[in-house]
Image (spheres, grey):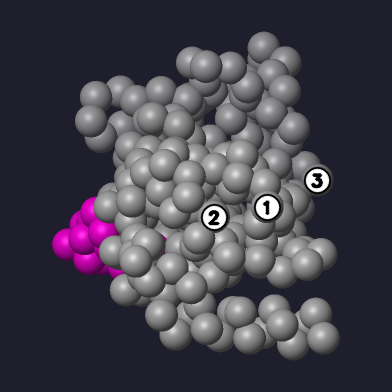
Amino acid sequence: MKIAALLLVSLSILSAAHGAQARGIDCSKAATKLDRAICADPAALDYDRRMAAAYGIALASWNGAITRYVRLDQQEWFTGFRTIELEAAIDSDCVVTDPACIRDELRRRVEAMESGSYTYSGVYRAAGGMKLLLHPGRANGYRVRVYDPARAARINIVTVGGERAALWDGPQFMVTTMGDSNGLPLPKEDGCTLRMLPEALAIRVFQNGACGGQIYEGTYHRLLDETLRSYELELH
């Protein structure tokens, strides 16, 4: 029964997702418990409206070149968020009677979508199979992981922890200090920074330093049909 309920929720969401996400909730027509809970909470409702606005902006970014990714990313988040309405939801720790938790879920999504790095976020792959995952953060923040799926135990680096580990150099270049696969600093002789130039459908990576003796430099092409949600273990 739970699986059937999840399928029904998912199908109903996908059928109306694009318009609803672009407009936000119409509280005069709120039909679900979750919509009514959001409409009853001014802060949550404000997040919902901000998310709808950010979604519209993202769809138009790069003259629509990443529309497919933005829609898929939002659909996957939206589907997981809507499971809050189900008993024993598997994609959320929230319940529909907990407005603070719902508000936090919306806040985190808004922070990601309003981030200056959101339109660059996602999954990228180099010709040799290396992958780059760019996760948006609050304001202009971001976090990067670059790894070889076939040799992830050895070739796997991620932005180190710390407020100034992922910066912008002007409006175009992203510069991030890389750590080991857990985000811990590399030994001084193995340390490195990656300087990245994002474009609509690719990121060019320039390496400064040893990076543990591996080469991560190159061009990584965007995979519009993959989202960060599929790589949660790598990101967190």
Would residue 91 be found to the left or right of residue 82 on screen?
Answer: right
The outermost residue toward the top is 188
**Magenta stretch: helix, strand or loop mostly:** helix
Magenta-highlighted residues: 56-71
User: In the image, residue 176 lies at what x, y percent?
Assistant: 48, 27
Instruction: Mark 2 or mark 1: name the one nearer the start of the chain.
Output: 2
Any part of residue 193 in sight: yes
User: In the image, residue 39 lies at what x, y percent?
Assistant: 44, 54
In this picture, is 71 found above or below 53?
below
Q: Quadrant of the C terminus?
A: top right
Q: Nearer the viewer, residue 63 or 144?
A: 63
User: In the image, residue 148 lies at what x, y percent?
Assistant: 67, 52
Q: Which residue is mark 2?
A: 37
Asked if labels 2 and 3 touch by Cβ distance under 8 angstroms, the answer is no
Q: Quadrant of the N terminus?
A: bottom right
Instruction: Mark 3 or mark 1: name the one nearer the start of the chain.
Output: 1
